Amino acid sequence: MIKGKVLVTGGCGYIGSHTILDLWENDFEIISIDNFSNSLPISIKLIEDIGGKKLVNYNIDVTDYRKTEKVFKSNDIIGVIHFAAFKSVPESVANPTLYYDNNMIGLLNILKLCQLYNIKNFVFSSSCSVYGDISELPVSESTNLGQQKSPYGTTKRMGEEIINDIAKSSNNDSNYILLRYFNPVGAHISCKIGELPLNKPSNLFPVVTGVGFGRFEKLTIFGNNFETRDGTCIRDFIHVSDIAHAHTLALEKMLMPSSKNICETINLGTGNGVSILETVNAFEEISEIKLNIELGIPREGDVVAIYADNKKAKEYLNWNPKYNLTQMMHTAWEWEKLKDNIILSC
């Protein structure tokens, strides 16, 4: 039985595509908005091949209010999952105007249209970058937010504040769940879809696998003298399919008759901090390939160490991550080896 139609903005991107597959598996009907600013149209074919269904995608920019409204007007939508935003920390440092313009206007347009068309359930794609550099580890949802290290992180914090203000307004009767991702990695268990950025990736996993495959010459480790156990930054890597499933659970939570006027912020991470060197070692063990590594200076915008307290996600959403670091790296590596042939076959 179909539970209703869900709009996924940025549906052809990395997390969006995996979330669509998870929503399909859990009997939701999906429409997508994606203008392929950081994804490829072939993603639609990959999603359809795995899911066995046709995906309706509107190739428009959510910063265009008029065109976006047409999507809302022509569909009976029960909920929105909002991924559509730029997400590169280094790029946001280099071009903050681009990030404030795109990420904030797109979010505001979607929120206005949800109110106009009486859509009561909204899931926001947030980030652990809202925490900034902090001394308390692991971080919980009640951890005081530090100064964000990048314009990207600031747009996510501003987005959360906007949503919280709307949720507290006197005329609000909608539900909001804000999911703070830590570091999504890996590929679908089928290894037929994974991270597929238009430009050279800045995230660690696709750079590691790309160097291992020979796509890139070397891996640069940005700093090895931090106050961590091996001198490199520490991150909480979480499999993209675990992240995706949390969105399904969030929607199902909001659709329960008992859910009225909720606004919850929830961390999505494994709760385990893994260093950059430990991640490299995991790849080299799985692939039996020695990576070409160089040491670089720390990047502006990078946090030294962060990992999640995920107790709230487990209790509130009944969410439990399934994949460990070895499985994350295995799916990422298999996707790296297969993706050229998969794309050519489409």
Image: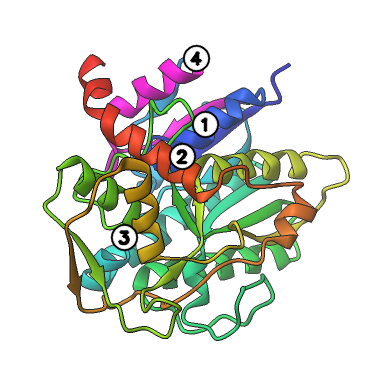
Q: Amino acid at mark 3?
A: Ser
Residue toward you, 85 or 87: 87
Mark toward the start of the polypeptide (1 vs 4): 1
Where residue 56 sits: x, y (%)? 44, 22
Cα separation, mark 3 vs mark 4, equals 31 Å
Q: Relative to residue 234, is residue 266 drawn left or right?
A: right
Highlighted range, magenta:
29-52
Residue under label 3, please give it.
88
> How many residues crowd around disc 1 within 10 Å: few (fewer than 14), some, or many (20 or more)?
many
Which label sits on residue 53? 4
Label 3 sits on a secondary structure element that is: loop
Q: How is the image coloured?
A: rainbow
Residue drawn at 15 percent across, 43 percent down: 215
Q: Residue at x 76, y 46 (%)?
A: 318
**From mark 2 to mark 1, how far is it between C-alphas?**
6 Å
Give the Cα distance between marks 1 and 4.
11 Å
Residue 89 falls within the magenta-colored stretch:
no
Quadrant in the picture for the N terminus: top right
Q: Do the numbered discs 1 and 3 sit on residues whose CB atoms are within 8 Å?
A: no
Q: Amino acid at mark 1?
A: Ile
- Whether residues under marks 2 and 1 lie with C-beta atoms below 8 angstroms apart, the answer is yes
Camera-side residue: 16 or 274? 274
Please report whichever mark, 4 or 2, sits nearer to the chain's N-terminal start. Answer: 2
Q: Amino acid at mark 4?
A: Lys
Three-letter code, disc 2 = Gly
Mark 4 lies on a secondary structure that is loop
Residue 32 belongs to the span the image colors magenta: yes
**Marks 1 and 3, Cα distance to the nearest angstrom?**
22 Å
Where is mark 1, residue-wise?
20
Above-or-below relation of 337 to 105? above
